[in-house]
């Protein structure tokens, strides 16, 4: 997998470059597996980053994403619009269109989006919008604007992806409850994994899922949530062990409403850049049976993103 060698935003200070040469996972993915959370960045010369962005990534284009997909053994991708591209979905659309039907997308749109633009996004493979509440990533968008967008995308059969941090769930609960679509939570609502899995903070998240049958969760991003981190020893393949009880609890409690993704190219990550092969080897720790693995990696994402093929 080769990286672009030139580009106006390459190797920007403060942002780690993505991991070149991921290992081949030991875990063999079920046929038809979907990487349901990943991004494309630029390349910036072709698809400029948003002026309002809070970080500038290294270029990570569709060719690299598709090479990673094949290397890891995935069949398809769900490409999620990252904040560094704002509401300019051109890189995402370009990647979906170039994927031969193997990629679908989750876009970011503003209230000003026209019906024609929504139709074009749909034709390109977009099936959801993302609402981001993580303060370090975005400026505040009024909830009435978000609700208006949710109401407009509902007739298209799209869903809403929400990204927030655990301490903000109580304040956002009523807004999330009022969303009229399927709702997909990014990264289990970012629990603090130093707290007990049976403690009140994570119990609230599990209650949120239990009380809202339209809410799904991505059990992704152990590399972001982990405090114990990647394996200390080279070659050791059990990583991010502190995240396992949280993700496994969600998978086992809500097996039909979970998704998994690599989060490649791991935007805005401080500390270390994960080996994506190792991330795939995390999956059997959180979905320990073939039946759970098939739901997580094939059945659930297909139901949400490619329902016409079922
Ligand atoms: C992720 C996580 C992050 C960034 C973004 O859109 C984004 O910029 O999602 C993050 O910094 O936690 O899921 O990609």
Image: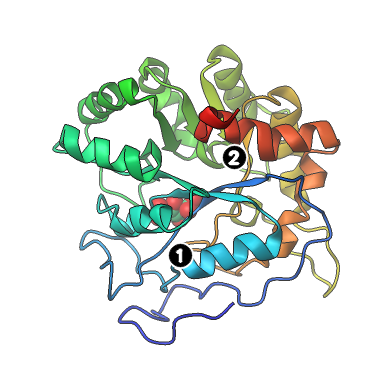
> At numbered mark 2, what does the secondary structure look like: helix, strand or loop?
loop
User: Can you name the residue that lies furthest to the bottom here?
Assistant: 5
Graded by Cα atoms within 10 Å as few (under 14), some (14 to 19) or many (20 or more), the crowding at tag 1 reads: many
Q: Which residue is mark 1?
A: 62
Residue located at (31% from left, 61% from top): 54
- Above or below 274: residue 107: above
User: Can you give x and y, in whole percent of width and height, for residue 56 in the image?
Assistant: 35, 69
Is the residue marked 1 within 8 Å of ligand 1, measured from its CB? no
User: Can you give x and y, in whole percent of width and height, for residue 151 in the image?
Assistant: 27, 21
Q: Dots 1 and 2: beta carbons under 8 Å?
A: no
User: Can you give x and y, in whole percent of width and height, for residue 4 in the image?
Assistant: 44, 81
Q: CA distance from mark 1 to mark 2?
A: 30 Å
Quadrant for the C terminus in the image? top right
Quadrant for the N terminus in the image? bottom right
Q: Which mark is residue 191?
A: 2
Which of the two residues, 268 or 197, is positioned nearer the viewer here? 268
Of callouts 1 and 2, the N-terminal one: 1
- Nearer mark to the viewer, of 1 and 2: 1
Residue located at (40% from left, 21% from top): 181
């Amino acid at each position: 997998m080769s990286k672009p060698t030139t580009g106006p935003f390459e190797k920007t200070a403060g942002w780690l470059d993505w991991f070149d040469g991921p290992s081949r996972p030991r875990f063999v993915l079920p046929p038809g597996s979907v990487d349901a959370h990943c991004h494309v960045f630029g390349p910036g010369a072709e698809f400029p980053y948003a002026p309002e962005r809070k970080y500038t990534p290294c270029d990570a284009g569709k060719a690299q994403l598709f090479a990673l997909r094949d290397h890891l053994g995935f069949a398809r991708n769900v490409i999620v619009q990252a904040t560094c591209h704002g509401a300019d979905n051109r890189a995402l659309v370009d990647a979906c269109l170039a994927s031969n039907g193997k990629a679908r997308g989750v876009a970011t749109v503003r209230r000003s989006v026209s019906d024609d633009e929504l139709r074009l996004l749909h034709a390109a493979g977009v099936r959801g919008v993302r609402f981001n509440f993580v303060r370090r990533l975005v400026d505040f968008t009024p909830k009435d604007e978000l609700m208006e967008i949710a109401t407009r995308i509902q007739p298209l059969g799209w869903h809403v992806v929400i990204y927030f941090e655990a301490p903000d769930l109580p304040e956002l609960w009523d807004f999330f409850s009022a969303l009229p679509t399927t709702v997909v939570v990014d990264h289990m609502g970012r629990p603090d994994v130093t707290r007990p899995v049976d403690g009140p903070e994570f119990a609230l998240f599990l209650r949120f899922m239990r009380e809202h049958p339209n809410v799904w969760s991505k059990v992704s991003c152990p590399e972001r949530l982990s405090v114990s981190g990647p394996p200390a020893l080279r070659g050791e393949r059990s990583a991010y062990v502190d995240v396992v009880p949280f993700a496994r609890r969600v998978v086992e409690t809500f097996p039909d409403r979970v998704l998994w993704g690599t989060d490649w190219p791991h935007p805005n990550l401080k500390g270390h850049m994960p080996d994506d092969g190792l991330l795939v080897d995390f999956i059997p720790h959180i979905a320990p049976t073939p039946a759970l693995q098939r739901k997580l990696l094939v059945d659930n994402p297909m139901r949400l993103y490619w329902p016409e093929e079922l």
